[in-house]
Image: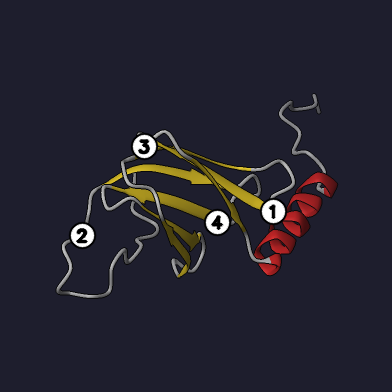
Amino acid sequence: GKLIREYEYEKDESKVVEPLHLLRLDPAGMYLTTCANDRTIRLFDFYSGECVGKGSGHSELITGIAFSSDCKRLVSVSCDGCMFVWRLASDITNAIKDRLQELKNEKPISTTLENA
């Protein structure tokens, strides 16, 4: 394949970039969450690559992350035995919901060819 997008993970050159071990896209494919060995969750705009949010608090490696069905929250779980629920900014939630509605209203592309 061909590289179509690259994200700047850390802009501070003095920091060591931690390897990513987990990522998830939101249901509309607009935001990407990442987790690294530094136990920090980052939320990126999938199209611009801009980091729009960052959260930390787990004391061990994050092992799971998921968007809630209403797209208002992000849930993370870690080897420390804790589950955190993160509230997403309303503009992010609204953007996801608007895009999901657009996708729902789009007509499906026909997968069969009609005989001429």
- Neighbourhood count class around disc 4 (C-alpha, 10 Å): few under 14, some 14–19, many 20 upward: many
The first of marks 1 and 2 along the sequence is 2
Of the 4 image quadrants, the one containing the N terminus is: top left
Q: Which amino acid type corresponds to the residue marked 1 in the rendered image?
A: Lys
Say what secondary structure mark 3 lies in. loop
At 71% from the left edge and 41% from the top edge, which residue is drawn?
Answer: 69
- Neighbourhood count class around disc 1 (C-alpha, 10 Å): few under 14, some 14–19, many 20 upward: some
The first of marks 2 and 3 along the sequence is 2
Q: Which residue is mark 1?
A: 72
Q: How many marks?
A: 4
92 vs 25: above or below: below
Marks 2 and 3, Cα distance to the nearest angstrom?
Answer: 22 Å
Marks 4 and 1, Cα distance to the nearest angstrom?
Answer: 13 Å
Q: Position of residue 26 (x, y in %)?
A: 59, 48
Q: In screen coordinates, is 109 left or right of 84?
A: right
Q: In screen coordinates, is 51 left or right of 106?
A: left
Residue in front for this viewpoint, 48 or 17: 17
Q: Which residue is mark 4?
A: 31
Asked if marks 4 and 3 touch (Cβ < 8 Å), the reply is: no
Q: Position of residue 72 (x, y in %)?
A: 69, 53
Q: In screen coordinates, is 91 left or right of 43?
A: right
Q: Which mark is residue 17?
A: 2
Say what secondary structure mark 1 lies in. loop
- Which of label 1 and label 2 is nearer to you? 1
The first of marks 4 and 1 along the sequence is 4
